[in-house]
Amino acid sequence: LAKTTQPISMDSYEGQEVNITCSHNNIATNDYITWYQQFPSQGPRFIIQGYKTKVTNEVASLFIPADRKSSTLSLPRVSLSDTAVYYCLVGDSPTNQAGTALIFGKGTTLSVSS
Amino acid sequence: GAVVSQHPSRVICKSGTSVKIECRSLDFQATTMFWYRQFPKQSLMLMATSNEGSKATYEQGVEKDKFLINHASLTLSTLTVTSAHPEDSSFYICSARGQGLSSGNTIYFGEGSWLTVV
């Protein structure tokens, strides 16, 4: 399973754009990149998933360069409620119904201040 | 809304007793579920993979006789912590891969269950 490396922590202010970069040099051809958000005492919550190029949904964008050895989660105009731990994971294709488990790294603790 | 539900959300038990945590997939069938443990300010650690109708696969270092996993149906997996000790106190989280949901096929996590052993 591909190992991921993220910054341990990041600080931001309300209204700013936050970009969290994740390195996954050993990503496999069939691996997808998925980001989760976790608040204290809650299970991780799916944010976004992608394979290559750019993916955007209502809460975030995910940028993946052509070599797929890294990815960047972009959170536009963060608010205090975006303070959480963000995990970058690589794993099986979504169509792999059984699939292997997601292995979590240390994640990035994002602190948003007013 | 949640697609994977855990119960109970919090439980306190006495040392030496057993406690069961349930994980249910809502509106979809999950042939495989995963159990994680998370200590305060640490990341999630995979404990085992729960397979419907067969034995669970445990990660290295996880005692299968202590953490009993049963996946008797396509929507329910249970984790039983037997002969609990204070060091078993932790946040336990299950997950399952959703299929055919409007949000796509990805892994969803339960809300987590806090276990405190006194």
Image: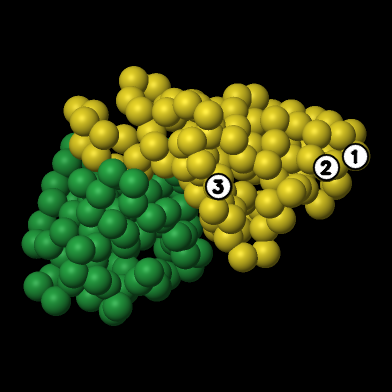
User: Mark 2 or mark 3, which has the lower sequence index?
Assistant: 3
> Is disc 2 placed on a helix, strand or loop?
loop
Q: CA distance from mark 1 to mark 3?
A: 25 Å
Marks 1 and 2 in Cβ contact (< 8 Å): yes
Work out whether mark 1 precedes mark 2 in sequence or the reverse, and give the earlier one. 1
Q: Position of residue A72 (x, y in %)?
A: 24, 63
Q: Amino acid at mark 3?
A: Ala
Residue drawn at the location 20% of the way across and 63% of the way down: A30
- Write down the residue under mark 3: B56
Quadrant assignment for the N terminus of chain A: bottom left
Q: Which residue is mark 2?
A: B84
Which of A84/B114 is in front?
B114
Residue A58 in picture, x, y percent from top left = 19, 37
Any mark on residue B15, and which? 1
| Circle 2: residue type | Ala
Chain given the colour green: A
